[in-house]
Image (spheres, rainbow, N blue to C red):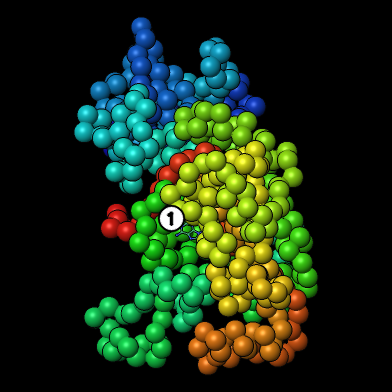
Amino acid sequence: RALRFCSSVPCPRHKPSSKLSVRDALGSQNTSGERVKVQGWIRSIRSQKEVLFLHVNDGSSLESLQIVADASFDSRELTFGSSVEVQGQLVKSLSKKQNVELKAEKIEVIGNCDAKAFPIKYKERHPLEFLRQYPHLRCRTNVLGSILRVRSEATAAIHSFFKDRGFVHIHTPVITSNDCEGAGELFQVEPSGKTKIPKENFFNVPAFLTVSGQLHLEVMSGAFTQVFTFGPTFRAENSQSRRHLAEFYMVEAEISFVENLHDLMQVMEDLFKATTMSVLSNCPEDVELCHKFIAPGHKDRLEHMLKNNFLIISYTEAIEILRKASHSFTFTPKWGVDLQTEHEKYLVKHCGDIPVFVTNYPLALKPFYMRDNEDGPQHTVAAVDLLVPVVGELFGGSLREERYHILEQRLARSGLTEAYQWYLDLRRFGSVPHGGFGMGFERYLQCILGVDNIKDVIPFPRFTHSCLL
Ligand code: 4AD
């Protein structure tokens, strides 16, 4: 690495500089000249009289660290976007804009950047659609930086939530031979042409990327009682919608000895609220920036969601509400037909922007594993979806059919008896009432940050006709 800029070599009697992240430097209490080293990328550069001001960011925080260098520094290679290592003294800043700044003694350019060729201009507020063209560079902007730090915080908060409640974390497989949701939206997995094993013989059965870890979690809840998984999930949905991806992350939980939907819904509501509170307290500036930049007014909407108890209506009531609405829908709401996004949006608005659980869906609309309510001609199952502002459906869950003979009949009707013998076994060997749910993680982030398009809350979005990088 070439040492390009150096005004003065630090005195050998001084202690060697300790390396700090920008976040730690900004939060440091030790501002009486502590000698430190900071590495990052130049976000802005400004010269004023005999002084050069740089802002350096390393992604550890939204705020950048101000570097103050005297005129003896050669500024020719200090361009926007270059990576640098700065050594100097941490001091109290005279400006009201920041508490701390770094008085540079040595600035080393690690990698320079042709700022003119860099497609993202920092002083401009590029729309999110524009930034989507540059999945390899957009993470260096403030807005994507904030979204992705929130994503990281929310991931940690979800793990803490389950750990604090005694759930066991299970790694469910990515490659599987079952189609949990039965919707057939599967990506098939085969070895590439270079392997010596014929592709149809690799697993001996057709294998797919998982659409849900639920069935594997059900196996584990039969041993550990409360389990969760949080991993990538794949659906070959032909959709370019603002809330669908071909690869998304799902948080799934499965709980044994749960006998009613209310207990399950309470866990979903607690998960949403506890995760959001944790994000708000750990990265408030990032959330604030997203709200300000992307969705002004969303802060109040989020507070409203957090302070109110979530509402509960049945599917039948939901259809009634929709049928009585003066709104004209593209798809006429009808009992026995699935809710469309426009219906979900209307229901959330109707509920005053408070998240609403919709329960007890027609059996014919739902997969074989949901518990039969045995409630006469309308015939529903103990299913629940949570609808929220911004995205509509955020969670899907149900009580599971734990009664052997009923499950056996349901599987037989779908021609699945043979493939699901192992699943029936769970009902033969110590079956218990149980239930679970899945939450789309990207939709969760959209909901709390007010991000309209799901492609902006995941680092590398994959969807129909697009797999950049
Ligand atoms: O409602 P879904 O399909 O439920 C299941 O997969 C259950 N087996 C989960 C369980 O009970 N363990 O999906 C759950 C959630 C949806 O509510 C939605 O938020 C999200 O996953 N989701 C998607 N998110 C992004 N892109 C897609 N293509 C999605 N499909 C579902």
* Kind of residue at disc 1: His
Drawn side of residue 239 relative to residue 283, left or right: left
Report whether residue 218 is seen: yes
Residue name at image x 56 percent, y 28 percent: 297
Give x and y (percent) for residue 385: 61, 58
Of residue 34 and residue 204, the one placed in the foreground of this image is: 204
Q: Which residue is mark 1?
A: 244
Give x and y (percent) for residue 316: 65, 59
Give x and y (percent) for residue 465: 28, 58
Residue name at image x 63 percent, y 59 percent: 315
Question: What element does badge 1 sit on?
Answer: loop
Say above or below: 179 vs 311. Answer: below
The image quarter in which residue 125 lies? top left
Drawn side of residue 212 relative to residue 160, left or right: left
Residue name at image x 21 percent, y 33 percent: 117
Of residue 302 and residue 318, the one placed in the foreground of this image is: 318
Q: Where, quadrant-wise, is the N terminus in this rendering?
A: top left
- Ligand 1 neighbours mark 1 (CB distance < 8 Å): yes
Give x and y (percent) for residue 104: 44, 23
The image quarter in which residue 138 lies? top left
